[in-house]
Amino acid sequence: MKKGLLVLCLGVLLAIVPFFVTITPYVLNIFMQAATYAIAVLGMTVVLGYAGQINLAQATFFGLGAYAVALGTIDLGLNFWITLLMAVAVSTIAGFVLGLTTLRLKGHYLAMITISFQQIFDLVLNNWIDFTHGPDGIAGIARPSLFGYAMADDRVYLLFCALVLYGAMFLVWKLPQTRTGRAMRAVRENELAAEVTGIDSLKVKVIAFTMSAALAGIGGALYASGFAYISPDNFNFARSIEFLTMVLLGGAQSPFGGALGTGLLILLPEWLRFLKEIYLAVYGIAVILIMVFLPAGIWGLITARLARLRKPVPVDTAGIPKLDIDVAITNPAPILRLDNVQKHFGGVRAVDGISLEVARGTVHALIGPNGSGKTTLLNVLNGIYRATAGAVEFDGVNITDKTPHERAGYGIGRTFQNIRLFPTMSVVENVMVGAQRPNNPIGTGYAMLRQRALSALQFVGMAEHAEVIVQSLPYGHQRLVEIARALAGHPTFLLLDEPAAGLNQTEKHALAELLKRLRGHGLTIFLIEHDIGLIENVSDRITVLNFGKKIAEGDPSYVLRHPDVIAAYLGEPSHGAA
Ligand code: ADP
Ligand code: MG
């Protein structure tokens, strides 16, 4: 907090310099432009940097804000502050609608749609002359007054813009530590894993897009009244690219990066003006070089350097409460019922009519040769795949058509055969995402989530690594973090897909111990595993798949000696004279 105050003081000092030093109106204009652009660029920080979604229409939202103020004050004669609210409302609604309708698309499809939206806006501005004043633009936009004081003085207005910018920076800076901000980053890092841990990824992306548009709208509103004149050229596709370049150049992961990138890209042309004709070429090359060699932007480089100097934060593991994984069993009915579930991929019947019941509080193992449909069945269970036919009933509810995040909300947790963590987030943040799943009976505040995450990490023996960036951990540790992430959500039903894969003997033993500690708490575990020793050791019941069909089921001692099972594993025909 102290650091934040210090930064704020520095910023305010910067913004009041013009009151003490003579600065030409031209330079003041440049600062005003930088401040208003930066607010729009902060939107890009949220949507692109945090949520990982491309947006090539930021100039449209900026323009909507600007035109709301221009048309509102001039054509409708409204007070600036009312038009500012209109600017925020219009850009927010536009962002929400565009986000809601397009964010199901990914990558270049999303890019294309946002470009089209940008082009439509450009056409409307230029051609709907009666309403927008057309290509001539709108002149004579007045400066607002605050508490009866007109902000006609550029220095005063710059200070006002700077204060709005600082407020926006503060919010964007704080966002990653909130539930929504963490969810955005999780979606960026691994959307599938985010869904499975209970995040409604579409909702989170729409929120990011809407916030981004709202910030652009505010920036545009201040821009219009700052420069008194706007025209369609200020809000075209090139401007959207400029906003994108600014955020990438400065560093999309932090509001400081966005502000830095904006400042640089606005000042760079001024500094390079002495180059005359070749200035654009030099400018372009400079930007390309920086982006190629600094993928995390300039601010990313600075923070990476600083992080190397900083000592790792020691985690006080002594005070962490024991993880509560108890699940009350009040109902004798099976927790999971599969009724003739099928999943086909074209002609491949990966899961071919499985009916199955899993009793509460047990460890139920699913085994079978490679390609027998185990992972596919798990994916059908937690909603990554829709079943081609059949029904899935969980805890008395038919969940056949529920999304993965809804199922997470019912208490289904899971790990993946190929680990799916949120690689650039810290260990504890990864696990906090698990803790914040919907309907988790723990509290929702930051402290509660963090404590739950630390408890889960302690349970799997990883608490001391809580502050480490998860991708720097060795493989075996990442497996444990993934289990902790699932446990932090206090699941009633835990799906583990080959948790021992890739582990060495020592780690396998530790895993077996961990699984044993999970037993007897009412938690049901559905375990896919190849290691027969481990299976025999921990499971209450085993189901065997081959070619998508169930070939055996029962107690470990019975199933593991079943001739069909042995034949399936040895690759021999189960019938006939082999
Ligand atoms: P297991 O986990 O038992 O090794 P899987 O469930 O991964 O087996 O695969 C079962 C069968 O389904 C395999 O033949 C595999 O090639 C096929 N399969 C799995 N996922 C897909 C997919 N997304 N598209 C097409 N075929 C798939
Ligand atoms: Mg598999």
Image (cartoon, grey):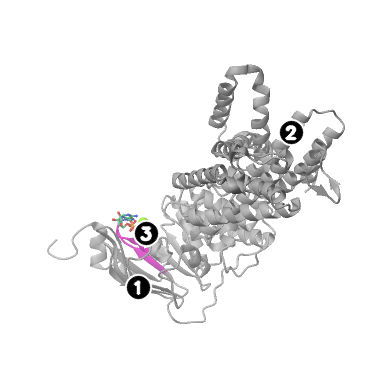
Q: Looking at the image, is mark 1 or mark 2 earlier in the sequence?
A: 2
Q: Is residue 54 visible?
A: no
Determine which quarter of the picture holds residue 321.
Answer: bottom right
> Which residues are the magenta region?
364-377
Instruction: Give the image location of residue 542, x and y in percent.
Output: 35, 69
Instruction: Give the image location of residue 368, x and y in percent.
Output: 31, 61
Residue marked by disc 2:
29
Q: Secondary structure at mark 2?
A: helix
Mark 3 CB in 8 Å range of ligand 2? yes
Q: Residues within 10 Å of mark 1 (few under 14, many from 20)?
A: some
Residue depicted at 69% across the width and 50% down the height: 75
Q: Is residue 113 magenta?
A: no
Residue type beneath disc 3: Thr
Q: Looking at the image, is mark 2 or mark 3 earlier in the sequence?
A: 2
Please name whichever residue, 209 or 403, is drawn nearer the observer in this view of the structure. 209
C-alpha distance separating marks 3 and 1:
15 Å
Residue type beneath disc 1: Leu
C-alpha distance separating marks 1 and 2:
70 Å
Q: Nearer the viewer, mark 2 or mark 3?
A: 2
C-alpha distance separating marks 2 and 3:
60 Å
Residue type beneath disc 2: Asn
The image shows residue 361, relative to residue 212, as above or below, that is below
Q: Nearer the viewer, mark 1 or mark 2?
A: 2
Residue marked by disc 3:
375
Residue depicted at 78% across the width and 30% down the height: 25
